[in-house]
Every structure is written in structure tokens, then in C-alpha cells.
Image (cartoon, rainbow, N blue to C red):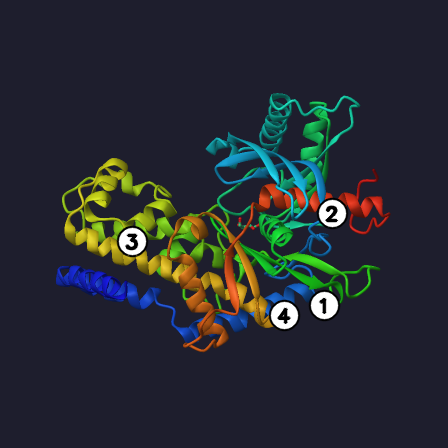
Amino acid sequence: MTTHHSSAKASEADGLKTLSPALQAELKALEADFTVDGPKLKHISQRFEEELREGLEKNGCNIPMNVTWTLGFPTGDETGEFLAMDLGGTNLRVCWIELKGRDGETVVTQEKYPLAPQIKTGDADALWSLLAESLEHFIDANHLRREDGEALPLGFTFSYPATQEYVDHGVLQTWTKGFDIKGVEGEDAAAQLTEAMKKRNLPVRLVALINDTTGAMIASAYNDPETIIGAIFGTGCNAAYMEHVKAIPKLKTDLPGDTPMAINCEYGAFDNAHRVLPRTKFDERIDRDSPRPGEQSFEKMSAGLYLGELYRLIMCELHDKSLVFKGQNITALRKPYILDTAFLSALEDDTFRTVRTWFEAKLNLCLNEEEFHLSRRLSEMIALRGARLCICGVAAICRMKGIQSGHVAADGSVANKHPQFKARWAQAMGEILDWPSDRKEDPIVITSAEDGSGVGAAVIAAMTLKRVEEGNMAGIRQPR
Ligand code: BGC
């Protein structure tokens, strides 16, 4: 195994030696810009911790540390039937979830509805009508209407920064991940969805609005009590953890100080002031051309939406310097966001023959061996930086809370589709937290999250309904 690995590395190094001197010089400069070493990681994490603390202290800080009114971890005894709806980047997913407790088998029936790209830049009406229409279709296709006409409880996963005064409420602070829908920022997304459902007379009541990170943490904790954090490394990047109410000075509440409250950090916004992140000109370009320049600085350097884009921008620049794809028409490569994470991970792992076929099919480009070796190194460099940076947020939470062990439940396209990510995260965590290099196992382990936006939304809805039953209405708006 080891021999195979080192010989693979050796042949990669040999491949890089075949690059022209001009390309070697370019690559060297890029590698210098994209490398984040251990001391730098520590420095970033220290600043990260400061921003996390500031967000708990006061409203309006850069990292908002949103309270979610998910009060504590599930017991594992939560049961019942729930609708769950997840507004993702490419799809809308609607689920019917039957929870049977930790020892029972959760049953998920689901359907995906495509989210046309124009929805993402359209207006609120079009968005909410589509959601209500899809929900109606799902309810009817699965014969879910109850004979007594009682409303079906819904957990709605809305994975954008939202101010929650209640669990069934969420005022959108700003769109992220390239969304730019007019008429939602500053408004209560839960109320807007409820209104659209009313127009269609849907027998549904929104019980909880949740973030995907909180969902990942709660769905995972439902099965695995060692879960401490839910982290998403997908189109966007963010994490949730559990905080004591007394450690959230900005929160004015009568709840006892030791009440646990899930915090959706929204740390994609880390370092928007550009104090510590080592931004390259390509990162600056991505930010400048995005719908919300100046926002989500950290996310734009590390999340899945942007990894392929970084590679694309570098290759376009090298082409413009007449160093790659010489004499070829790169029109397809000029299209923003044409390359996703799957493409980037294929570049790192697949053979020359496979990658060449991809280039022909997707970009109408003929890739030579030199460009292949260069691309492999660039994709590794971009993904490695992304993984190392992204874990700084998780490490900062652990440092702030003094967490020594437990499971970080991770989900998202990058965590799932990029094979090296988890190992790179773990390595960087060790560097930041000074784990001994000869350790047998990692004290904090990154696990694969359970389905947060389906099962997690259902478990949070179940926990909320249980609180209503017990007459504990703290953080619940709708009287039922
Ligand atoms: C959003 C977060 C979300 C993350 C991962 C970010 O852009 O602001 O709410 O958790 O993406 O999906």
C-alpha cells in the first residue's frame, strides 16, 4: 500500500518535471500563494475564535452566530411522521419521514424537484409558489392528506443565514451561494412560505425552520450521541454546535442558563474584513464577480461552489499567457461556474485517458499530457487549501468550547464526493490542535452525517412538538 502510494507520488512528480520552464515558474508562484502551512492555520483559527466569540456577544457581528431555538440534542426517543422540505442549490427535495426512535428504522420517502437556474435570480413569489406547488404535488402523489383534515407538520430546511426569534421563524440576513432572489432578504422566509401554502390551501403547518448544519448535527445525534458538531462542506461551508444559553450574552431570555441552544455559526462570513485569510487574485476575482461582493469571504475560498471556479480562472489566465491549450478555442472554459467539485476530484484521481475524455466532452478541448499533469497538481493544490482552511472553523469551535473529543458530523458534496477531503481535514485539525503526530487515533473524528435536511428537519419538528405538548413555548411562535 505504502509502496504503491509513494510510487504514485513519484510518477506525479516526474509528470510535473515535464512541464515547460515557463509553466514550472507559474506553478511555483501559484503553489506559494495557495499553500497554507501549520502556523498560518493556527493564526487563522485564533482569529476565527475571536470572531465566534464576538458573534455570541453582540448582534450584527461579522459571524452572526445565529440562535436556532433547537434546544438541546434529541433523546433518540422522538417518533412521528413529518414532511421535510429542503431548498438546495440545484434541487428542491420533499420528504415524508417516519421516525421510530433511535432503535427503530427511519423510513424516508422522497422526491426531488428541479430548481430552474432562473429561480435563483428571480423574485420571491416565483420561489415560494414553486415550493408550495411541489409540496402539493408530493402530498397528493403520496396520498398524505389526513381524513380528519389535520395539518401535516413540516420541517423546512432553509440553508442561508437567518435571524430566528422563534424556531418557526427566520428573517433572511443575506442570500449566499450565488442566490439572488428579490424580496426575501430582511423578510421572514417561514411566513412567506406559509402564505404561499395558504394560497393553495395546503394542509401543512410549518413547525420548524432549520439550517442544514443544525439538521446534520441533530440527525446524526439522533443515532450517535457522541456527535458534537454538524458541518457542511458542500456548495457552501458552515457549522452548528450546541451552546449554553448563559454563554450567549446577546440573547435576552428567561430560559435557565444551562439550557442548551443550537447555534448556526454562519462562519462562511469569517474574515470579511480580510485580516488573516491569504487571498489570491483569483479569490478576489470570484468575490468581485459574485452577486454579493465583500460577503462570505471564507466560503468563497473553500466551499464546493468555488473550487472548480478557481481552477477555471487559473487555466484561463494561463491560456491568455499562451501557456496552455495553445491555439485552441476556449469558449466553453470561459463560462463561469462550468466546473463542479466532481470535475475537480476527477482531475486529481482519474487517469490521463479518462480526464482527456472529460475535457473533450465538457469543454471541447484537447488536453495534452503536460496540461494533464499541471491540472492534477492545480486541483490538488486548490482542494488541499480548501480542506485545510475549512477545518479552521471546526477547530475554532472546539478550542472555544474546550471540546477534547467527539464526532463532527460532516455532509455536503465536497465531504462526500471528494475522496481525500476527510483525511486532509483530520491532518489539518491535528496541526491546529497540536495532536501528537504518532497518535493511534484522532480524538475528534469527522464522521459522515445522517440526512440532516430530511431526518434532521423531522427530528427538530418532533422535538418542537414535544415542547408544545409539555407547555414549554420558549422560542415557539405559533400557538397550536
Ligand atoms: C449558508 C449556510 C449553509 C452553508 C452550507 C452557506 O452559504 O449561508 O446557511 O449552512 O452555506 O450549505
Q: In the image, which disc is placed on residue 348?
A: 3
Give whichever of 459, 126 is nearer the camera.
459
Q: Is residue 165 above or below residue 203?
A: below
Three-letter code for the amino acid on which mark 4 is drawn: Lys
Pointer 1: what residue?
Answer: 247
Q: In the image, which disc is placed on residue 401?
A: 4
Describe residue 82's horizontal placement relative to residue 236 as left or right: right
Q: Estimate the spatial distance between the alpha carbons at disc 4 and disc 2, rounded to whole Å.
A: 24 Å
Q: Is residue 25 above or below residue 319?
A: below
Three-letter code for the amino acid on which mark 1 is drawn: Ala
Q: Nearer the viewer, mark 3 or mark 1?
A: 3
The residue sitting at 36% across, 43% down in the picture is 336
Give whichever of 9, 281 is nearer the camera.
9
Three-letter code for the amino acid on which mark 3 is drawn: Glu
Q: Quadrant of the N terminus?
A: bottom left
Q: Estimate the spatial distance between the alpha carbons at disc 3 and disc 4, rounded to whole Å.
A: 36 Å
Quadrant of the image occupied by residue 426 = bottom left
Q: Estimate the spatial distance between the alpha carbons at disc 1 and disc 2, rounded to whole Å.
A: 22 Å
For marks 3 and 4, the one nearer the N-term is 3
Give whichever of 448, 317 is nearer the camera.
448
For marks 1 and 2, the one nearer the N-term is 1
Pointer 2: what residue?
Answer: 463
- What crowding class fits label 4: few (fewer than 14 Cα within 10 Å), some (14-19), or many (20 or more)? few
Three-letter code for the amino acid on which mark 2 is drawn: Met
Q: Give residue 198's position: percent from left, percent from top.
A: 72, 27
Q: Are discs 3 and 4 less than 8 Å apart at CB?
A: no
